[in-house]
Image (spheres, helix red, strand yellow):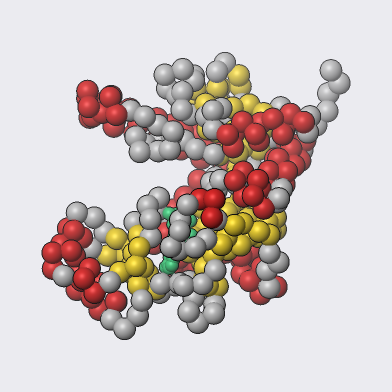
Amino acid sequence: MTEKTQAGPVLLVGSPEDIHVDVVARRLGEEGVEAFVLDSLAFPEKTRVSLSDDLEGITVDGRPVGRPGAVYVRQFHGHPLAMGVDVSEDMEDDWRTTLVVFREKATLLKGLMGRWEALGVPLYNGPSSDWRTPKPTQLALLKAAGLPVPRTLWTNDAEAVRRFAAGQRVAYKPVTGGAATKELFAEDLTDERLGSLDAAPVTFQELLPGEDIRVYVLDGEIIASLRITSSALDFRQNEERVEQVELPAEVARQCVKAAEVLGLRWTGMDLKRGADGVLKFLELNASAMFLGFDARAGSDILGHLARTLARAARG
Ligand code: ADP
Ligand code: MG
Ligand code: MG
């Protein structure tokens, strides 16, 4: 083999059984670039990771990967609640040890990402954006940068909720995401209902009644913008329509800026139109799924992502 300047392979962090990891790996292969999967679901049971005290001293399954060409971070499987993880038996058996195992695993993987970041490896996405991505941080940062976000309150204070809800339609949802958004009604403002805030804080937000928009930004460029139409009364998935839309120049500029503010090289963001007609940022996802959107809207988010990773790997 002739020697050439190549930094590869592209490292994929996640489970090979995750369809996004699988498909990105195969597409990279078609681009003539090797994809190497750090199977984070099988770590530490099967996947072997060794880090020495040298920044580049990184071995995964016996292979030195000190400087991959690029890294696609799909998932760490670093928590018992993470998607694809099923440890209910281990948790029932010995929850404390199980939690310790996850904490050890997550710390090592985060430490590994930090090294690649320090080495200048292009990470999609890297740990430098971690502190900015929790929604209470990201929305406030976006607003501070002059971008439109819905009025929002994250709280476990019942009185604060009553004050916030006065005179406006309000939606509520988990702080982390992953559960349905509901409208807050007068009957939710009783002492009894709001007493559940003793158990966990909740997101309360200006209810945005308008259209749902999903935008993908990769390395500072919009690679797909989609409109999702679903009837609120009928939420069967096949009632949902996804189509590509052209964004007004101002909104496109805002989306690129939002990704930059949060330090995300790669993101799928949710926007929704308010009663005042303004499209507002609901969130930027650091590891957005995209295959469903490609399939339904005919976009090529996969192609863009794979070509970008391949280009980085070719150096
Ligand atoms: P997740 O991280 O769970 O995806 P989002 O903030 O994106 O959280 O909310 C999920 C969906 O719920 C949004 O795409 C939107 O359709 C709906 N939604 C969220 N917040 C509001 C809101 N303030 N008003 C109306 N609908 C909302
Ligand atoms: Mg969302
Ligand atoms: Mg989300």
Q: Observer-nearest residue: 36 or 68?
A: 36
| Depth check, front residue: 301 or 257 | 301
Residue at point 21%, 71% (across, down): 187
- Please say if 248 is above or below 255: below
Q: Which of the 4 image quadrants contains residue 192? A: bottom left
> Is residue 289 in view?
yes
Q: Name the residue located 84 percent from the left edge and 17 percent from the top edge.
A: 1
The residue located at (56%, 45%) in the rendering is 289
Q: Nearer the viewer, residue 127 or 228?
A: 228
- Give residue 265's position: percent from left, percent from top: 62, 51
Query: Is residue 103 toward the left or the right of residue 139 in the image?
Result: left
Going by the image, does 4 lie left or right of 222?
A: right
Q: Where does residue 47 sit, x and y in percent of width and height?
A: 49, 20
The quarter of the image holding the C terminus is top right
Q: Is residue 270 left or right of residue 226?
A: left
Tell me what residue is drawn at x 45 percent, y 58 percent. Answer: 234
Query: Residue 209, percent across and down?
Result: 46, 72
> For residue 4, what is the image quadrant?
top right
Q: Position of residue 299 (x, y in %)?
A: 70, 51
Residue at the extreme left of the image, as rendered:
192
- The relative height of residue 233 versus residue 82 in the rendered view (above or below) is below
Q: Does the rendering let one see residue 176? A: no
